[in-house]
Image (cartoon, grey):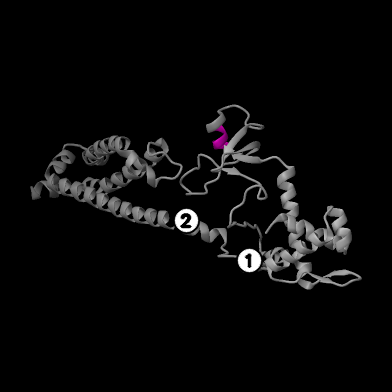
Amino acid sequence: MDLRHLRYFVAVVEALSFTKGAEKLRLAQPSLTRQIRDLEKEIGVRLLDRTKQKVSLTDEGRSFLADAKRVLNLAEDIVDHPNVILISASGAKSVFGNENPIGKILLVTSGSVPVEIVGVVGDVRSARLDQQNDMEFYRPFVQENFPFLTITVRSPLPPDSVAKSVQAVLKTIDPGLALILPQPVSEIMAQALGQAKLMMVLLGVFAGVALLLATVGIYGAVAYTVEQRTGEIGVRMALGAQTMDVLRLVVKQGMVPVLFGLVVGLAAALALGRLIATQLYQVSAHSPLLLGATMGVLAPAALLACLFPARRASLVNPVEALRAE
């Protein structure tokens, strides 16, 4: 459809006469009449009722008039206003460094359209939540648009009510517009984070089981050692060793290998941390806080596993221990 046909139609409607409309457009009346008929033939409806005395709009013509004026206004806006763009903060820094990007010219889209930067906006994550976009830019809809739009509405109302309200507004713009797949942001976030949450839950379960097994293993090893050294412990206590001395002896024996393992594990985590970097969100695999918290969980668990056998060893009766020996 030619914009010229829309201008001709609006001119005739505003003048309510083909003669006055032709004078306003500086066209011959037969030519204007033919253009209007071509427009009606193209869209398949009758827009005007014509008589010798007047010209009036049909019901379809009234509906079409609003659309025609909107399209013409958009076209005028494109012509009268320069091409402009908003750019993301990361994009501005990557292209212009520390320079002020306002007023700079960029070539965007496949047609290399020159546009002027009129503002800088915050960064968003439009591709993946765990991946920050290097470049994002925003163009006025009348200057560049796409066949599908995403409409975001903030409202305290239920999602169904919001969807119906948006659909009602769209119908006032164009009855043919459809609202596809309305979703609350919480549902979209749940879908985006679903796999990551599942992975974290599984890793958490496996880590918990591993911690439990390690604690039970340390307890078993220290308890076995205490059992083997019952006679020695009895001799020490008979010679004057106090309860704290026995506790210190057993705990030291159990914790030395644990501390050695923590040091080796810390070195391995620093060396191989990049392998789990993709599973971390805005946290470095070499974060001192993260590594310190991990060691802060493992060390007390190992100490607790050593304390129970150590406590039992401190309660050994020296006489019974020597008799059993």
Q: Is residue 248 above or below residue 321?
A: above
Q: Which mark is on residue 92?
A: none
- Amino acid marked by disc 2: Ala
Q: Is residue 219 above or below residue 269?
A: below
Crowding around mark 2 (Cα neighbors within 10 Å: few <14, some 14 to 19, many 20+) is some
First along the sequence among labels 2 and 1: 1
Q: Quadrant of residue 267?
A: top left
Q: Is residue 66 left or right of residue 207?
A: right
> In the rendered image, which quarter contains the N terminus?
bottom right
Q: Residue at x 50, y 42 (%)?
A: 133
Q: Is residue 284 left or right of residue 21?
A: left
Front residue of 38 and 124: 38
Q: Residue at x 62, y 69 (%)?
A: 160
Front residue of 140 and 7: 7
Q: Secondary structure at mark 1?
A: helix
Q: Position of residue 81 (x, y in %)?
A: 73, 42
Q: Position of residue 148 (x, y in %)?
A: 58, 57
The answer to if 204 sits in the magenta stretch is: no
Q: How many marks?
A: 2
Q: Position of residue 24 (x, y in %)?
A: 86, 54
Q: Which mark is on residue 163?
A: 1
- Amino acid marked by disc 1: Ala
Q: Residue at x 85, y 57 (%)?
A: 22
Residue to which mark 2 is pinned: 192
Marks 2/1 in contact by CB < 8 Å: the verdict is no
Q: Position of residue 208 (x, y in %)?
A: 32, 53
**Main secondary structure type of the part rendered in magenta:** helix
Q: Residue at x 60, y 41 (%)?
A: 122
Which contiguous range is marked in magenta? 89-93
The answer to if 90 sits in the magenta stretch is: yes
Crowding around mark 1 (Cα neighbors within 10 Å: few <14, some 14 to 19, many 20+) is some
Q: Is residue 6 above or below residue 175?
A: above
